[in-house]
Image (spheres, rainbow, N blue to C red):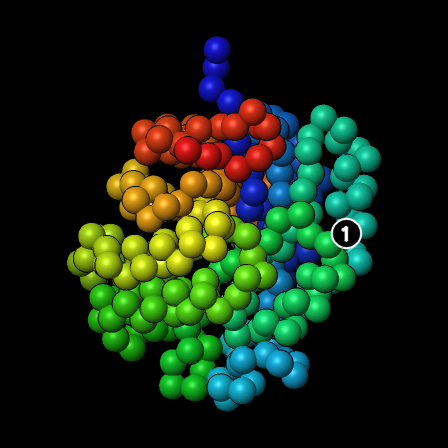
Amino acid sequence: MGSVLPPDNHVHTQWSWDAPPEASMVRSCEQALAAGVPAVAFTDHLDFTVSADGDRIAAERISPRPYARMRLLDVPGYLATVQECRERFGDLRIFSGAEIGEAHLWGASAQAVADGAGFDRILGSLHAIPFEGRLTPADAMFRRMPTDEVMRRYYAELLRLVEGSDLFQVLAHLDFPRRMWPRTAPPYDERDFEPEIRAVLRALAASDRVLEVNTKSPLASAELLGWWRDSGGTALSFGSDAHQYWRVGDRFKVAVDMAEAAGFRAGRDRFDFWRR
Ligand SMILES: [Zn+2]
Ligand SMILES: [Zn+2]
């Protein structure tokens, strides 16, 4: 019996503000079927640039990220495309969703959108950290301080995200700044940050949520999934974080082997998260 691949619960489409020209929900569905994943969640970016009453970012007087091209998700347009794809690809389970950036700082804004949209899957992400009064992207942080200090600040803020927002179900790409790791810096070693990472994982497990294995380089390790298990974590989500359709389901076989080595398995419902 061949191994069953899990759903790809983290895919971007043309509705994400950072979508490249190749982004396509239709072609992502075709790729999902070709890759053999049973389901796909389209988790386009839900980011905000203007605060509403009740958002902590305003109360704490933090300036939003200065990305001119960042724009609010067009929820009706997005949902219409999801519906078209559901009609066209009957053999594929399609979840609606969103990836919320810094949900603890944008709580009121994000809640209002999520309530209206009825998403199936909501991912929580930390792409930027408050620093000197600005929400600062990780790559800019690396230009300001040593790598270990960036990661300590990142994990501290990640803990605030998990403790400060219950809007999301899955914590995405736990070690996101590694993607921007400076070439001249010593290599990243997660053991250097074990206490900080474990604190995040304990808070996530205590609120009965799900850890993502993100297959956009670099992968989480089996050791990290062991920490997740020790912390009481029971559920895993797999996500390619594809922004180009051809990356849907990318490296899932490697990720599945790693998850199995850490004691996680597909459940009876192949559309569900993996459990242990
Ligand atoms: Zn992300
Ligand atoms: Zn993403």
Provide residue 208's location: percent of width, then percent of height: 48, 50
> Residue 74: percent from the left, percent from the top?
74, 62
Give the quadrant of residue 38.
top right
Q: Which residue is mark 1?
A: 79
Left or right: where does residue 266 sit relative to residue 69? left
Q: Is residue 216 visible?
A: no
Q: Quadrant of residue 68?
A: bottom right
Please tell me in which quadrant of the rendered image residue 177 appears: bottom left
> Is 226 left, or right, of 38 in this rendering?
left
The residue closer to the viewer here, 37 or 158, is: 158
Residue 268 against residue 141 in the figure, above or below = above
In the picture, measured across the screen, residue 36 lies left or right of residue 155, that is: right
Q: Is residue 150 visible?
A: yes
Q: Which residue is nearer to you in this view: 154 or 195?
A: 195
Left or right relative to 3: residue 90 = right
Residue at 52%, 31% (x, y): give it. Answer: 6
Q: Residues within 10 Å of mark 1 (few under 14, many from 20)?
A: some
Q: What residue sits 34% from the left and 68% below the top? A: 156
Q: Position of residue 237 (x, y in %)?
A: 49, 41
Which quadrant of the rendered structure holds the C terminus?
Answer: top left
Can you give x and y, in whole percent of width and height, for residue 152 in the image?
A: 28, 67
Decide: is 132 above or below 135.
Answer: below
Inspect the image, locate mark 1, and give the three-letter code of the amino acid beneath it. Leu
Q: Please name whichever residue, 265 or 219, is drawn nearer the observer in this view of the structure.
A: 265
Q: Secondary structure at mark 1?
A: helix
What residue is shown at x 56% (from left), y 42% (from top)?
9
